Amino acid sequence: MDVFANLAAGIAGVLSPINLLLLASGVLVGMIVGVMPGLGPSAGLAILLPLTFGLDPVGAIVMLAAVYYGAMYGGTITSVLINTPGESATVASTFDGYPLAKQGRAAPALVIAAVASFVAGTIGAVLISVAAPVTAGVAASFGPPELFMLVILGLLTLIVVIGKKRLLGIISVLIGFALATVGIDIGGGQQRYTFGSTELINGIDFIPVAIGVFGVGEILWNLYCGAHRERLGYFDLKRASRRFWPTGADWVESRWSMLRGSVLGFFVGATPGAGATVASLMSYSMEKSVSKRPERFGKGAMAGLAGPEAANNAASAGAMVPLLTLGIPGSASTAVLLGGFLMWGLQPGPLLMQDEPDFAWTLIGSMYLGNVMLLLVNIFCIPAFAKVAKVRFQILAPVVIVLCVLGTFAVNGSIVEVGIMLGCGVLGFFMRRFGLSPAALVIALVLGPLAEETLRQSLIISEGSFGVFVDRPVSLALLCFLPVLCLLPIAVKLWRRRVSPAAVPVEAQPTEPGGDHEALDTAEHETNR
């Protein structure tokens, strides 16, 4: 009963005029960020985060969360219309979305995608309402050893799902940990790697790093891939679509796909490190495996669009569970949101829903209203958002870089942080160039101080003995799960050999080099964002 009362209070908190305005602004900005190829939710959140400085924390996080899941909606538009994913989680939407557009069914495909996203977002919000209090209640009993093992488990999950480039994932995590050590040693009080600079005594702030690797780094990467030379053709939605609304057969075909994708996406998204891209690709494979006509996939199957669309939006909701209840970001985007929490003096974790219930439940309540807004905006403003894709990269790139510089400087008025941001932009480019993961770096930077603090506390409790991680039942269970997680990829490979070939159609796989058009190494797409 408390859940319903808290949820009602949260929704009532969103209904204030200022919060509704911020929610609507986040929805629209998220759609635009998702539509623009070359940006993604991580880059959009990193660029916009400094602009929320000075806002009420509740309104600011409501807006940023709307940008996060709004970008999932927006990325589908260019995936369907011009076969160019707006961000990595919508790569799977190109497999059947673009063939549907070539058949003159772009509008029905976009309506089905919007409804699937709405259904998944609503189911995700319901599951958050139920799962978050339970998870927070269990996690409230955790001590430093359990929290340390959770951090390690989350980072190991991120490394495992990267795929074939696990060594590069480990290197990315270690770079993030190295950046997190800059500042004052919390144990002895000595300065570490500050090089005599007073600006670095408090450590390297999360915001310039996130803006650099996601904002500037993404622009440099797209320049390297030749985005400034591309001329994306404009898809005339009205002329190309014979009818706007889907047929009854379309709804029948996609109804169970939406539900399956919603449930799958939520639980995959709630797993730290997995992300929306993994969820959407898993959903596509599942839909093809359960379909009575799998040969239609890759040629314009509505179920092949509805399932992945539901999965990636449900995953964005699922990723909020470990963020709110454990303080562990499950993806690059939620790592940026975690930076926002810390910037406003809020500490996500087991006590957040007890100490700041108004904040937590208003955020959850905003997801219900935000999904309604996104459904209406998607269905009735699709032609307008399709025109946003016409913005030339020559205009977009300098605007984004200027916003990155101004946003970084606005937080603390520090030129040193602007330099760190630009340096991290170059670092982010080279990480993408050589296959490292910017997302793993950022997540490790956020979790690094927590890992160090909880490890020190655990060793103090045990007087220097590592046996503390074995003596406590929960910590021991998490420790035993680590080798299982490491062996999981081997089990998946063996399972794939026993079943039919990969469900992803070869003819539908993007082949252009760079960005979202790299070969689909599942989680690598998510980590690159």
Image (spheres, grey):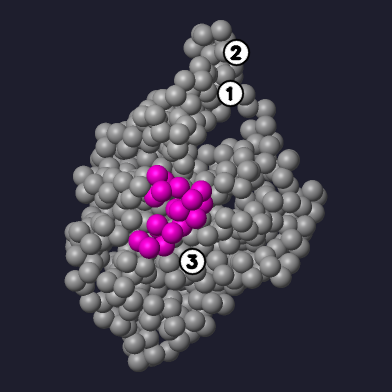
Q: CA distance from mark 3 to mark 2?
A: 45 Å
Q: For this view, does 490 lie left or right of residue 76? A: left
Looking at the rendered structure, the kind of residue marked 3 is Gly
Tell me, for residue 30, which label it has, or none. 3
- Residue that numbered label 1 is attached to: 144
Residue 121 falls within the magenta-colored stretch: no
Asked whether 310 or 79 is in front, the reply is 79
The residue segment tinted magenta is 401-418
Looking at the rendered structure, the kind of residue marked 1 is Pro
What type of secondary structure mainly makes up the magenta span?
helix
Q: For this view, does 344 lie left or right of residue 198? A: right
Give how far across and how far down residue 341 sits, in percent. 58, 47
Residue 38, by quadrant, is bottom left
Q: Residues within 10 Å of mark 1 (few under 14, many from 20)?
A: many
Q: Going from the N terminus, do you reach mark 3 or mark 2 first?
A: 3
Verify CB contact (< 8 Å) between mark 1 and mark 2: yes
